[in-house]
Image (cartoon, coloured by chain):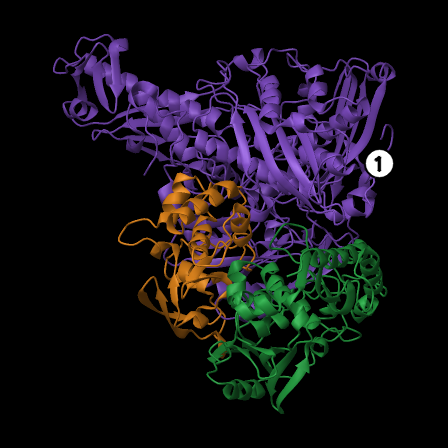
Chain colours: A green, B purple, C orange
């Protein structure tokens, strides 16, 4: 671990000021990604600003029906929150499908959104990685890439976004509320994560020092019927090979509205509007679901070891839609 | 404490008492190597190579040396040359002979004596600092320039360079065998199976990372080491550093899992001693989790061709098993895959062989059931394929070819209960409910598969010594430099001693893991009970004899004049068998004799019974899997193993050991795979988030049954050892169950979903598929 | 030989461990796990991976199970930390410890403190009643010896007694 100084911020204003004064400072919340990557010398901040004391731990319903989740709400608390369980079951399920009981007690809502890829080459400073050291090349492109993304990739980076929670949130059209040098703003999660393109080192649209203060999930009544399905190499405590978050509004057997997002296969939490379009107005059933799955993976680019993920993701999505239809909330 | 107690003469051996070291483990009081507090202790972290083959051109340690807290950075540029290794090289040792190979270091270690790099992740420098944080960070600051050479990494592309292994396997078995006439046997067969089975590199990943603390006192050094072999480490340190063995003390009281990886003294062990000598202070090295992929061994890659021929009634007429496994460029280390094949079935025509391929990877080593776990995956998968080809029940096929005597040597078995294991296991498992056709069993949306396989492991034994000391307070101390790896050594040795002497097990103190104690073999090969257990039994019996002698010849004792065999000791009280009320305690007897303890040492070793009998443990393992027909995910729903392992000293710890073996087998079957980058030999999934071992959710309830087996030949206590047999057969049983569930035969471990679902149509079909190209007889 | 940089300077850290206050001067990089093991000689909390992948370092922070290896000691100030050494009261074992002993819920013992700390925390968490629920909730605690089946039995035994 690179040496650093440690400061605790009692207010967001203090946190922002400290971050503005030191471009190599990082906010420390649950620490489950940051401390891990600091040990690997992948992250080398010179200052840590502990933001866990910020008063951002409430889950409240806003007048417009949206659910506001403070950035410091722990993943386990969010997963078991009654409103979340009732209104957005797929979010609760996605949270519980991620990591372990201990990590969920530590990880925060804001931090989960910003967790970094598990690409082994990114995590190994001995290996070239465009995300870690721009311009050094992507080791995964022609290396061990069984776990890598097939959607949203570029020739510079095929690293998978690891979050389960973010997949549910992007399906729900959630947005982050931030505080930054330019004041507060709201960023849809679909616009928070950037595709790698030629600059995989720039992962989000957050400005330097900008702080996520809350996540807002719009009211979406039909999301009370929603589901998260995760497929992985062991029964628990593993990152997704493929996952699907789905919510379907059925009217007399016809899909009136749907939300679809995929995990484990994209460089960002992957909202699939193509799949949603394929579901719209169609009768619920195997043929429609398969068509949606084909549409969702239409642009997928396989590499040497991960081609199986394309069909796996399709089947995972079909499974999620099928099971949702069979077991309405 | 609710441990059931042995009443009267029934004895505590064979009863399921709680572990005697359990209290220390559940309270966190058991101290493992890295936890020994020493004044002035320094922390050292290894720097490892980032290429797989070549020369170090330059190591720049300036930034590391300037880093706060750093005491010394050892590299090939400044590490003192070891006279022992120079002499070995001078005398023609190339460092590439067989495992051990007369090398002073035992294994081919990386001790910064030269600038060669032979695998990615090889230790090349050591940073010593006053804190773990300082040493870890400074290690990241060491800059290395290499002259890289093209490495050989991939087994598949290196297979043409395979060469036959010609040394004795495990120092005793021939590398290849031939009996009968294989070609004739194949010609006589009605049905043949000829398939290649592969298993990947795996790593042990015990939960405790390897650790060594070295502290010098003048020319004596003490090492606290996480090792399965304190005397082995002592020998390696003494030879490497050219000091007398008596100047080396090695201590290992608790080992946080080992599974073979801690059976050798690896580079960090000797480096710790070298570093502590260099800086004149005690030094601790804890191997990082990443460094447990490469520098401390692992299971090699194997490619095994199995050919079976049988007549219509299932009689085997031909059996051929050729194994090629990977080793490093540093050592010839062999995974002995075909040994179990030689003894398992009564087939008149059989050929077996071992070959090696050299790769630029870390040297492999023993990993739980080395050879048997891998070899039985191949053989027992092939037997299942043969059963399908014959349309015969797989148990019936095995019984048809049951070996009543060792088919290789012709010797009788010291004991064998495999028939009972098959039959009893099938009964308890509900094997009769199995409908043999693939994809014929379902529950809900899931495909159900039943599979079984044979388990076997040799009943090894080596010379061992122990001291039993009856103390004047009625307690007993047992001393033996064996080891507690989680196998229950403290517990079962206490049980053996308690019964031998006749005192409650609570009064037994067992001391292990210290070269100040009598010499014992490596705790590996499932031989701690057979070897050390026998020595403890004999030492305790000898101490008891001396105690009885003291009593019967003491005019003041109520037992004076009794015949030796009349005396009975129960709960620490000596009585005449016929007159129990008259007697005295050990305390009163010894008090009259000056309060001196009675101490007896026993040296136990196998005798010529090993020439007369073939000694193996056998078992049968049954599993039920559930396979998702669309996603290809496999879950083991239940597992059952039946075993004939001789006398079971403690059913509670024994059952746990065997369940653990089966769990290890689930990992091997479904997930374990060390991934190495084919371009540069980098261990890619070198952590335990990405190198998957089973978690709670992967492991169902497991049933373990013991066949009552008396073995009067195997050793003085009649036990065969159970550390490894639980792991054998499991991977094949699961692969066979997966075939039964899905119709897809996976011959390449691990059975991950990507090898299954592409073969399984989303619209279910009943025709069996092959996950790997089939040659010869298929479905 | 090295010179201490401004950043390498030790900071005062006050930790509340098992009900007692400990004042330490620590390198800010020190994790709670290393503070316990290397500075306070509370070695019951184990280091199995140092990267949040095995659960051997599980402790309670304000009653919730967390990983000490990913918690910086400086960031653990103000929290009530409980380790395996502080689990029993007045020399009595916690019922979970006794259940692990009776069900033989361990072999080598290295993952055991973490398993027990996780299992005790589980008693206060929403976790379904079945063995499979327990398996899922405990999946962050790896056991390479493979004592899982006995661990689940031990936990269910305690749950039946305290949450009938």
Q: Is residue A165 visible?
A: yes
Q: Is residue B330 visible?
A: no
Between A57 and A283, the one lying in front of the other is A283
What residue appears at the point 47 percent right and 68 percent down from the top-left corner? C72
To which chain does the residue with label 1 belong?
Answer: B
Mark 1 neighbour density, 10 Å: few (under 14) some (14–19) many (20 or more):
few
Q: Position of residue A156 (x, y in %)?
A: 79, 69
Q: Position of residue B471 (x, y in %)?
A: 24, 29
Between B286 and C107, the one lying in front of the other is C107
Q: Position of residue B567 (x, y in %)?
A: 24, 13
As drawn, is B705 to the left or to the right of B199? left
- The quadrant in which residue B76 appears is bottom right
What residue appears at the point 64 percent right and 87 percent down from the top-left corner? A185
- The quadrant in which residue B505 appears is top left
User: With respect to residue B121, does B264 lie above or below?
Assistant: above
User: With respect to residue B372, does B690 lie above or below?
Assistant: below
- The quadrant in which residue A272 appears is bottom right
As drawn, is B439 to the left or to the right of B614? right
User: With respect to residue C32, does B708 lie above or below?
Assistant: above
Q: Quadrant of the N terminus of chain B?
A: top left
Q: Quadrant of the C terminus of chain B?
A: top right
Specify the farthest residue to the left.
B556
Q: Position of residue B565 (x, y in %)?
A: 28, 9
Specify the farthest residue to the bottom.
A182
User: Which residue corresponds to mark 1?
Assistant: B767
Helix, strand or loop for disc 1? loop
As drawn, is B105 to the left or to the right of C27? right
User: With respect to residue B727, does A132 lie above or below?
Assistant: below
Between B589 and C107, the one lying in front of the other is C107
Specify the farthest residue to the front.
A252
């Amino acid at each position: 671990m690179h040496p650093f100084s440690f400061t605790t911020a009692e207010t967001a204003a203090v946190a922002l000021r400290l971050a503005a004064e030191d471009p190599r400072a990082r906010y420390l919340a649950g620490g489950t990604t940051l401390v891990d990557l600091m040990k690997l010398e992948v992250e080398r901040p010179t200052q840590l600003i502990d933001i866990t004391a910020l008063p951002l731990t409430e889950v409240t319903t806003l007048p417009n029906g949206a659910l506001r989740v403070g950035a410091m709400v722990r993943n386990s608390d969010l997963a078991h929150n009654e409103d979340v369980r009732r209104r957005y079951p797929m979010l609760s399920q996605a949270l519980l499908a991620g990591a372990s009981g201990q990590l969920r007690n530590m990880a925060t809502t804001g931090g989960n959104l910003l967790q970094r890829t598990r690409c082994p080459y990114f995590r190994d400073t001995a290996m070239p990685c465009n995300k870690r050291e721009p311009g050094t090349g992507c080791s995964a492109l022609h290396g061990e890439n069984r776990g890598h993304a097939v959607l949203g990739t570029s020739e510079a980076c095929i690293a998978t976004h690891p979050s389960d929670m973010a997949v549910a949130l992007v399906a729900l059209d959630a947005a982050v509320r931030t505080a930054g040098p330019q004041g507060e703003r709201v960023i849809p999660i679909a616009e928070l994560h950037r595709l790698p393109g030629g600059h995989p080192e720039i992962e989000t649209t957050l400005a330097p020092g900008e702080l996520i203060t809350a996540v807002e999930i719009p009211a979406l009544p039909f999301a009370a019927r929603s589901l998260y399905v995760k497929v992985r190499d062991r029964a628990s405590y593993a990152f997704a090979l493929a996952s699907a978050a789905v919510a379907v509004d059925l009217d007399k057997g016809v899909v009136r509205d749907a939300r679809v997002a995929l995990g484990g296969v994209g460089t960002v939490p992957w909202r699939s509007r193509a799949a949603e379009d394929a579901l719209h107005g169609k009768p619920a059933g195997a043929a429609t679901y398969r068509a949606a799955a084909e549409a969702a993976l239409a642009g997928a680019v396989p590499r040497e070891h991960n081609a199986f993920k394309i069909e796996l993701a399709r089947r995972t999505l079909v499974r999620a839609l099928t099971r949702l239809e069979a077991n309405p909330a | 404490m609710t441990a059931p107690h042995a009443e009267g003469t029934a004895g505590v051996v064979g009863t399921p008492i709680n572990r005697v070291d359990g209290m220390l483990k559940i309270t966190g009081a058991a101290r493992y190597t890295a936890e020994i507090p020493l004044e002035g202790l320094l922390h050292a972290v290894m720097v490892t190579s980032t290429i797989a083959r070549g020369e170090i051109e330059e190591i720049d340690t300036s930034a590391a040396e300037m880093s706060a807290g750093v005491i010394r950075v050892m590299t090939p540029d400044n590490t003192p040359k070891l006279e022992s290794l120079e002499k070995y090289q001078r005398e023609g040792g190339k460092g590439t002979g067989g495992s051990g190979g007369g090398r002073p270091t035992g294994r081919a270690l990386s001790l910064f004596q030269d600038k060669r790099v032979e695998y990615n992740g090889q230790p090349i420098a050591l940073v010593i600092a006053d804190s773990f944080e300082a040493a870890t960070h400074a290690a990241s600051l060491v800059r290395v320039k290499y002259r890289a050479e093209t490495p050989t990494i991939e087994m598949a592309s290196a297979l043409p360079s395979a060469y036959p292994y010609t040394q004795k396997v495990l120092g005793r078995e021939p590398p290849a065998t031939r009996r009968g006439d294989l070609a004739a046997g194949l010609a006589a067969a009605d049905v043949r199976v000829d398939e290649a089975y592969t298993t990947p590199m795996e790593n042990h990943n015990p939960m405790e990372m390897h650790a060594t603390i070295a502290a010098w006192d003048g020319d004596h050094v003490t090492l606290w080491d996480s090792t399965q072999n304190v005397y082995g480490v002592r020998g390696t340190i003494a030879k490497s550093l050219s000091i007398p063995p008596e100047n080396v003390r090695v201590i290992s009281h608790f080992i946080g899992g080992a599974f073979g990886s801690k059976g050798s003294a690896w580079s960090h062990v000797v480096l710790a001693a070298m570093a502590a000598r260099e800086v004149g202070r005690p030094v601790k090295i804890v191997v990082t989790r990443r460094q447990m992929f490469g520098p401390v061994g692992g299971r090699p890659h194997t490619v095994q061709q199995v050919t079976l021929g049988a007549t219509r009634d299932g009689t085997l007429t031909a059996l051929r098993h050729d194994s090629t496994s990977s080793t490093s460029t540093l050592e010839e280390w062999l995974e002995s895959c075909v040994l179990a094949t030689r003894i398992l079935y009564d087939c008149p025509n059989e050929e077996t062989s071992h070959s090696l391929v050299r790769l630029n990877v870390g040297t492999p080593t023993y990993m739980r059931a080395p050879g048997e776990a891998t070899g039985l995956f191949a053989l027992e998968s092939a037997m299942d394929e043969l059963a399908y080809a014959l349309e015969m029940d797989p148990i019936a096929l095995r019984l048809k070819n049951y070996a009543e005597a060792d088919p290789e040597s012709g010797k009788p078995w010291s004991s064998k209960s495999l028939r009972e294991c098959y039959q009893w296991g099938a009964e308890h498992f509900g094997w009769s409910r199995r409908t043999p056709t693939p994809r014929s069993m379902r529950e809900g949306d899931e495909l159900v598969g039943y599979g079984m396989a044979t388990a076997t492991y040799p009943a090894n034994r080596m010379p061992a010594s122990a001291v039993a000391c009856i103390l004047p307070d009625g307690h007993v101390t047992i001393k033996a430099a064996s080891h507690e790896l989680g196998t229950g050594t403290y517990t079962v040795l206490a049980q053996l001693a308690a019964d031998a002497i006749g005192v409650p097990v609570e009064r037994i103190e067992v001391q292990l893991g210290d070269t100040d104690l009598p010499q014992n073999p490596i705790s590996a090969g499932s031989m701690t009970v057979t070897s050390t257990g026998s020595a403890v039994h004999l030492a305790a019996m000898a101490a008891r004899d001396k105690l009885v002698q003291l009593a019967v010849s003491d005019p003041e004792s109520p037992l004076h004049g009794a015949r030796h065999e009349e005396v009975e000791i129960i709960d620490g009280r000596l009585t005449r068998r016929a007159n129990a009320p008259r007697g005295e305690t050990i305390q009163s007897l010894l008090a009259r004799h000056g309060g001196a303890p009675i101490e007896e040492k026993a040296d136990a070793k196998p005798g010529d019974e090993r020439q007369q009998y073939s000694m193996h443990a056998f078992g049968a393992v049954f599993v039920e899997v559930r396979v998702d027909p669309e996603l290809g995910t496999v879950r083991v729903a239940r597992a059952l193993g039946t075993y004939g392992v001789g006398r079971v000293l403690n059913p509670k710890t024994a059952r746990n050991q065997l369940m653990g073996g089966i769990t290890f087998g689930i990992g091997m079957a479904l997930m374990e795979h060390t991934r190495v980058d084919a371009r540069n030999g980098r261990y890619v999934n070198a952590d335990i988030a990405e190198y998957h071992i089973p978690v709670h959710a992967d492991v169902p309830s497991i049933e373990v049954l013991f066949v009552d087996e008396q073995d009067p030949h195997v050793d003085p206590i009649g036990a065969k050892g159970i550390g490894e047999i639980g792991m054998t057969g499991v991977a094949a049983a699961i692969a066979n169950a997966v075939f039964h569930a899905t119709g897809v035969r996976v011959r390449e471990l691990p059975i991950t979903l990507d090898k299954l679902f592409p073969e399984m149509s989303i619209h279910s079909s009943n025709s069996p598929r092959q996950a790997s190209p089939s040659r010869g007889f298929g479905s | 030989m090295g010179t201490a940089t401004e950043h390498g300077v030790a900071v005062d850290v006050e930790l509340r461990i098992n009900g007692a206050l400990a004042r330490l001067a620590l390198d800010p990089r020190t994790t709670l796990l290393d503070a316990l093991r290397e500075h306070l000689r509370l070695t019951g909390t184990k280091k199995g991976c140092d990267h949040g992948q095995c659960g051997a370092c599980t402790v309670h922070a304000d009653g919730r199970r967390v990983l000490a290896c990913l918690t910086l000691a400086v960031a653990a100030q103000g929290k009530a930390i409980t380790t395996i050494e502080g689990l029993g009261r007045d020399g009595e074992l916690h019922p979970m410890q006794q259940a692990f002993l009776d069900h033989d819920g361990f072999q080598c013992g290295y993952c055991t403190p973490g398993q027990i700390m996780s299992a005790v925390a589980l008693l206060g968490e929403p976790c379904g009643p079945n063995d499979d629920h327990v398996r899922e909730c405990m999946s962050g605690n790896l056991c390479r010896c493979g004592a899982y089946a006995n661990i689940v039995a031990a936990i269910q035994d305690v749950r039946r007694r305290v949450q009938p």
